Amino acid sequence: MFDWVHQVPILSIVCYVPLIGSLFVIFFMKEANAASIKKFATGVVTLDFMVSLPLWFEFDPQGELFQFRESFSWIESLGVRYEFGIDGIALLLVLLTTLLGPIAFLSSWSAIKERQKEYYVFMLMLQTGMMGVFMAMDFFLFYVFWEVMLLPMYFLIGVWGGPRKLYAAIKFFLYTLVGSVLMLLGILALYFYNSSGLFGYGGLGNPKTFSITQFHEIGAGLPPDLQFWIFLAFFVGFAIKVPMFPFHTWLPDAHVEAPTAGSVILAGVLLKMGTYGFVRFSLPILPQATWELLPWMVGLSIIGIVYGGLVAMAQKDMKKLVAYSSVSHLGFVMLGMFALNSAGLNGSILQMINHGLSTGALFLLVGVIYERRHTRLIADYGGISAKMPAFATIFLIITMASIGLPTLNGFVGEFTILVGAFDRVWWWAVWGAVGIVLGAAYMLWMYQRVFFGPITNPDNENLEDLNGRELLYLMPLVILCFWIGLYPKPFFKIIEKPVDYIVGIVDAAQPAGMALADEAESLHATDEEAGH
C-alpha cells in the first residue's frame, strides 16, 4: 500500500518538512498576516504527520533492527556520516512527535497573540530538531540535533512565557547545556578509544567513525573503568533531560512559565530524549557500567517517584502539580528501564509514550481553563463541571489514564514495569506501587476541588465549554489512551526486537556473582512452589 516509502528518503522528508515550512514563513509571509501564518504552520505539521503515518504500516517488526536507513559520507576526514534509521523504539517516538505537532499548533491559535510569525517559526524548527534526535544513527549528527532543539525551546519560554519567563528560560538553557557538554565528552571518549586510543588505553585501531551501531558492537569490549566514566558523562546529560532527581529543578519552572504548546512539547517529547538516550546509548554501549551503577540508578529513580508524588500533593497551581507529576512518572520509566529485563524495558518504553499522551493532554486541559480565567490556582475553581461538562469528562478520562486505571494506557505501562521490577527485586515494585498511590491521591484531589461541589467563585458562572477546535485536538489523545489501554499488542510487537537486542547485550555483561544470586533466587522460588 505504501511501497513508495521504500523508494524515497522518507526519514529525511519527515524530519525536514517542518524546517522547510519555517523557512517559507520567514521569507515569504508577513507578520501582519497572522491568521495565514498560523493556518499555514498548522498545515505543515499536519502534512508532516500524514507523511509519517506510512512508517507505522511499512515498519517490519521482524525485519532488520534499524529500518528506512539513509547513509552517505558527510565529513569524511572525521568519519562523520549523515545517517538516519529507526528501530521500533524510535518509530514510536517519531510518531508521537509528529502527532503532538498539529495538536500543539492548534492549541496555540487563541493563546498566542503577539509575535506570531516568530512563534510558529520556532515551533517548526523545534519539530525538526526533536525528530532528528530520534532518527540519527551517527553520534555527531545526533549531537547536532540535540543542540539545535535547545535554542527554539529557550526562545519559546523566554519570549512567550509567563511572568518569570527569563529566569525559567535561562535555567533551562544552562542546565541542558551543561549536560550536553558532558555528553559530548563521553562521545569523544568513545570516538578516540575506537580509533586511536585514549589516556593510556591502547584503542582498537578501527577506522574513524561516529556510527552508533559501530559503538554498539564494541561497547561490551570497552575497559570497565572507561565504561564507568563514559556512563557518568552520559548520565548527567540524559538525567538532566529526563529529569531525574536531583537534576529536576529546572522542570517545574520551565513548565509553569512556558506557553501551553511549549509545555505539551516539553512533557510529550523533550523529556523522552533523556530516557531515549539511556535506552539507545547507555545500556547497549556501556553494559558493564550499567550493572556497576545499577543500585544508584534505581535509588535515584525510586526517590524521584516518591519525591515527585509528595511535592505534587503540596502544589496549589494546577500546572505545577502536573509538572511535578512528570518527575514521578519519569522516575517510574527509569525504574522499569533499570530492571534490565524484557518486562521492565517494554513497560518503560510504552510508558514513555503513555506519559507523552496523558501529561501532554493534561497541560492542554490546564491551558484551556487558563485561557478562560487567567488563573491556574486550584482554589480559584470548584464546581465547574456543571458549566463545562465536556471539559470535565475529558479531564476525568485523562486523569484516570495518568493514574493508571485499567482499560486506559497508563495501567498497561505501569503494570508491565511493576512486573519487571518485581522480577528483579521485589521491594523495587513496592516503592513503585507507593508512587502509583501518591499519583492517585494528588490527581483525584485536584480533580475533586476543581470540578465538584458548588460554584463559590462568581467568575466561574459564565465559563464556556470546549469549542470545536479544542475538541479536535483533544480527542485524538483520548482515543489513543483507550487504544493502548485496551489493545497494546501492536505497540509491544513493534518494540519487541529492539528490547530483546538491548536485554541480550546487558545480560551478557551481567557480573557472575549477580547472575548466580538471580539463579539461586529462581531455584528457591521453584522449590517452594514444588513444596506446595
Image: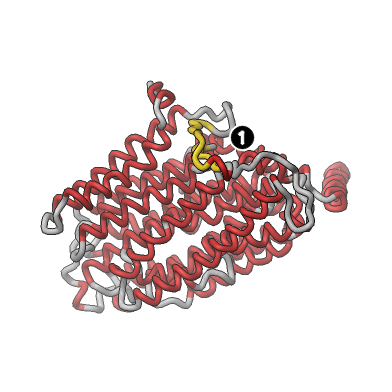
Q: Position of residue 334 (x, y in %)?
A: 60, 57
Residue 488 showing in the rendered view: no
Q: Position of residue 158 (x, y in %)?
A: 33, 70
**Quarter of the C terminus within the rendering:** top right
Q: Position of residue 1 (x, y in %)?
A: 38, 21
Crowd tier of the residue under label 1, counting other residues whose Cα lies within 10 Å: few below 14, some 14–19, many 20 or above: some
Q: Residue at x 41, y 59 (%)?
A: 266
Residue bearing mark 1: 497
What's the colour scheme? secondary structure
Residue 236: quarter of image: bottom right
Left or right of 72 on screen, residue 395: left
Q: Position of residue 388 (x, y in %)?
A: 24, 61
Query: How many labels sit on residues?
Result: 1
Left or right of 147 on screen, residue 464: left
Question: Is residue 212 shown above or below 418?
Answer: above
Asked which secondary structure carries label 1, the reply is: helix
Question: Is residue 266 shown above or below 354?
Answer: below
Q: Amino acid at mark 1?
A: Lys
Q: Residue at x 86, y 42 (%)?
A: 530
Which of the two residues, 352 or 15, is positioned nearer the viewer here? 15
Question: Is residue 243 shown above or below 283?
Answer: below
Q: Residue at x 73, y 50 (%)?
A: 197
Q: Looking at the image, which residue sits at the far left?
A: 32
